[in-house]
């Protein structure tokens, strides 16, 4: 019995050892491909080494140049430009009007003919190819435009290279005058770092403001101070918009010809100006109307007034103003009926003697008009006894 049980134990141990060796071999088989295969990120980097080759190293304006490329991403849109000064100033130094676009093939190659044009900057010139979409990639090939001027390359600035380290922000608020159309003002606060080897002393920035589709209006802003090499600095720059500005604006910051940051700015409408114009349109016509009514009231004649041949106005029922009494004052009894009543003589007083103008014609019974004249149509009347 003991011999049988010992054999069983040995067999079980062998089985356990075989299973352990099998598992170890399987693990090694899985790990070996991972160690021998190159990293996934290294394969595209090694494959993406874009290059350019030209059919000629020199050509004159109006000619044709064939550009061949390889090592680009498949099915990628590229732009081909002829640029001056080795494209130090960016696309501003390139003949953009004569540029061409090309799409790479499945293997990352292309072949394109482009016209030879003179760039706006002098040579040394290059043929520049860059991607339009996707991850950025570019390549340059030296080229000479025959007959184009040649000038030495501009010297690079020995000052520091500043870069924005934190998103910019606008600080400040609008006052009461801004509500009535005063220019809105803010402070652009940014944190920059000097990535160069030399300090940047009194850097000059360019602050631009744009509205809608219009291009930014740039203004120079010099910051007084020094940004040491490898250090960061908080910088505040004033920003001001024109009077009456409202709507959505974009504030841009440029340094060394490169845009460092952009910050949107929403400006409210100056409602005080609108209120002023509304009041002006209401008050001025009302004032003109009142002045016109006063003038008309002064000029027009009074109702019921009459004018004598001498030019004096007389109302109905008022005594006639004779020339003899024209020298009297307006408050005299001639123009005041109450005073005339007070000064009227008593009933038993003797009447004043009548003057020549007050003599009335007297008729005798024989000369009266009714006795001397008669209507022919009337029948004769009988005379009674006298």
Image (tube, grey):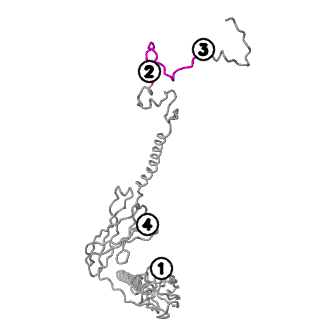
In-front residue for pair 60/293: 293
Image-quadrant location for residue 183: bottom left
Mark number for residue 341?
2
Dominant secondary-structure state across the stretch colored magenta: loop
In-front residue for pair 367/166: 367
**Disc with the residue nearer the chain's start (4 vs 3):** 4
CA distance for labels 4 and 3? 112 Å
Q: Nearer the viewer, mark 4 or mark 1?
A: 4
**Disc with the residue nearer the chain's start (1 vs 3):** 1
CA distance for labels 4 and 2? 86 Å
**Residue beneath label 3, please?**
364
**Residue beneath label 4, please?**
211
* Residues drawn in magenta: 337-366
Q: Determine crowd level at label 4: few under 14, some 14-19, many 20+ residues with C-alpha closer than 10 A.
A: some
**Disc with the residue nearer the chain's start (3 vs 2):** 2
CA distance for labels 2 and 1? 112 Å
Q: Quadrant of the N terminus?
A: bottom left
**Residue beneath label 1, please?**
132
**Given contact means CB atoms under 8 Å apart, are the residues at marks 3 and 2 in contact?**
no
């Amino acid at each position: 019995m003991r011999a049988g049980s010992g054999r069983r134990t040995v067999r079980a141990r062998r089985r356990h050892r075989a299973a352990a060796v099998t598992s170890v071999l399987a693990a090694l088989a899985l790990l070996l491909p991972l160690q021998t295969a190159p990293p996934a990120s290294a394969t595209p980097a090694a494959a993406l080494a874009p290059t350019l080759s030209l059919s000629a190293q020199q050509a004159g304006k109006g000619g044709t140049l064939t550009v061949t490329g390889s090592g680009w991403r498949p099915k990628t849109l590229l732009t081909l430009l002829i640029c001056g000064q080795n494209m130090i100033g960016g696309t501003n130094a390139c003949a953009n009007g004569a540029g061409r676009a090309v799409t790479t093939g499945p293997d990352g190659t292309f072949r394109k003919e482009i016209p030879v044009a003179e760039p706006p900057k002098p040579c040394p010139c290059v043929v520049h190819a860059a991607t339009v979409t996707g991850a950025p990639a570019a390549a340059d090939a030296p080229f000479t435009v025959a007959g184009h001027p040649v000038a030495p390359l501009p010297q690079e600035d020995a000052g520091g290279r500043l870069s924005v380290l934190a998103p910019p922000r606008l600080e400040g608020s609008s006052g009461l005058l801004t509500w009535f159309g005063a220019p809105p003002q803010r402070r652009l606060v940014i944190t920059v770092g000097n990535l160069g080897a030399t300090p940047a002393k009194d850097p000059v920035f360019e602050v631009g403001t744009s509205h809608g589709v219009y291009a930014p209006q740039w203004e120079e802003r010099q910051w007084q101070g020094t940004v040491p090499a490898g250090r960061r600095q908080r910088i505040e720059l004033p920003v001001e918009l024109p009077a009456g500005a409202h709507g959505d604006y974009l504030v841009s910051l440029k340094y060394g010809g490169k845009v460092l940051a952009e910050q949107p700015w929403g400006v409210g409408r100056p409602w005080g100006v609108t209120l002023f114009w509304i009041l002006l349109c209401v008050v001025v016509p009302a004032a003109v109307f009142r002045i016109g009514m006063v003038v008309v009231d002064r000029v027009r004649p009074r109702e019921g007034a009459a004018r004598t041949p001498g030019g004096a106005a007389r109302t109905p029922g008022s005594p006639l103003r004779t020339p003899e009494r024209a020298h009297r004052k307006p408050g005299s009894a001639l123009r005041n009926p109450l005073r005339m009543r007070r000064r009227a003589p008593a009933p038993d007083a003797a009447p004043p003697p009548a003057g020549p103008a007050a003599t009335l014609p007297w008729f005798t019974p024989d000369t009266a008009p009714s006795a001397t004249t008669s209507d022919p149509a009337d029948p004769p009347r009988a005379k009674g006894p006298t």
